[in-house]
Image (tube, rainbow, N blue to C red):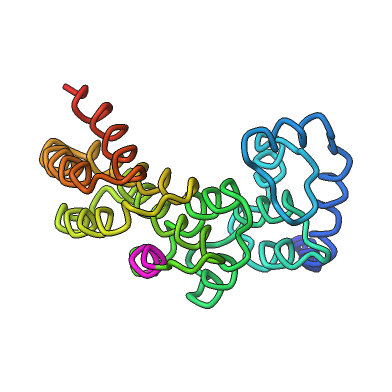
């Protein structure tokens, strides 16, 4: 007689699981780390606990692609910076929607949450290329991190979208030049990042990115000069 299989326990309620993970995060609070992060420009408007990315990645290992948990972590009230970082690490890119991407991007309040969401979650979503183009054109003062997200996506896709044709990235070079006058620190650094990563993708794109950087340099604004000089320093030194 065959033994009956033990019943599969029901999945834990995402909100309860999110609460348990947040309790673990809170137990790692470090004011010393908060102070250090703030010296590096990580100054979110949400509660900040100073928990390392290494610890958050460790927590995320058992909860990969758990979209309901990810949404519950992002929705914690009042919001917690590290809970939102963990949300980016646990989300399922195949279930991410345009509405979610736009809603999360509107609440980005530091460069690290912007970049982690783009690198670990959004760049794998079906709408990554679409949102990169859309967000790169945002110029309102309140949209600093939305615009950064556009260029962070470009940079991340240049590294990871191995099968994407060169034509996609060539089309982004004029967009980079268009936005190279934006002197907001978190924007110009992302514009530069996208230019360098496109240039490092292959020799053809490197030549195109160097040519674009030289055109940007001729724009002769402080932001454009910095973007061009930093990109040329790296790209012209490559073999």
Query: Is 233 on the left-hand or right-hand side of 147?
Result: left
Where, by quadrant of the figure, is residue 33 drawn?
Answer: top right
The residue positioned 47% from the left and 51% from the top of the image is: 184
In the image, residue 192 above or below residue 92: above
Which of the pair 114/42 is nearer the observer?
42
Q: Main secondary structure of the magenta part?
A: helix
The residue positioned 55% from the left and 62% from the top of the image is: 92
Which of the pair 181/103 is nearer the observer?
181
Query: Is 138 on the left-hand or right-hand side of 77?
Result: left
Among all residues in the image, which is located at the extreme bottom? 99
Residue 151, given in percent of the width and then of the height, sits at: 39, 54
Which of the pair 234/183 is nearer the observer?
183
Residue 46, given in percent of the width and then of the height, sits at: 76, 56
Quadrant location, the N terminus: bottom right
Quadrant location, the C terminus: top left
The residue positioned 65% from the left and 44% from the top of the image is: 61
The residue positioned 85% from the left and 59% from the top of the image is: 19
Query: Is 142 on the left-hand or right-hand side of 201?
Result: right
* Magenta span contains residue 166: no
Which of the pair 134/20 is nearer the observer?
134
Query: Is 215 on the left-hand or right-hand side of 135?
Result: left
**Span of residues in magenta:** 131-137
* Tally of marks: 0
Residue 72, given in percent of the width and then of the height, sits at: 73, 66
Where, by quadrant of the figure, is residue 142 drawn?
Answer: bottom right
Residue 35, given in percent of the width and then of the height, sits at: 77, 33
In the image, residue 203 above or below residue 171: above
Where, by quadrant of the figure, is residue 84 drawn?
Answer: bottom right
């Amino acid at each position: 007689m065959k033994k009956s299989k033990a019943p599969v326990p029901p999945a834990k309620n995402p909100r309860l699981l999110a609460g348990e993970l947040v309790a673990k995060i809170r137990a790692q609070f470090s004011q010393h780390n908060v102070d250090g992060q703030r010296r590096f420009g990580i100054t979110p408007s949400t509660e900040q606990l100073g928990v390392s990315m290494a610890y958050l990645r460790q927590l995320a290992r058992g909860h990969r692609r758990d979209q309901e948990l990810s949404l519950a972590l992002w929705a914690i009230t009042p919001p917690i910076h590290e809970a939102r970082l963990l949300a980016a690490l646990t989300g399922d890119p195949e279930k991410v929607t345009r509405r979610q991407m736009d809603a999360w991007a509107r609440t980005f309040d530091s460069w690290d949450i912007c970049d982690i969401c783009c690198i670990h979650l959004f760049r794998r979503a079906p709408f990554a290329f679409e949102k990169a183009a859309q967000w790169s054109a945002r110029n309102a003062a309140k949209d600093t991190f939305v615009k950064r997200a556009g260029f962070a996506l470009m940079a991340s896709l240049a590294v990871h979208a191995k099968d994407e044709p060169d034509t996609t990235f060539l089309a982004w070079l004029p967009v980079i030049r268009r936005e190279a006058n934006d002197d907001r620190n978190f924007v110009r650094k992302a514009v530069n990042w996208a230019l360098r990563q496109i240039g490092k993708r292959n020799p053809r794109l490197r030549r195109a990115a160097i040519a674009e950087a030289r055109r940007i340099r001729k724009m002769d604004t402080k932001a454009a000069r910095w973007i061009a000089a930093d990109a040329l320093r790296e790209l012209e030194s490559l073999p």
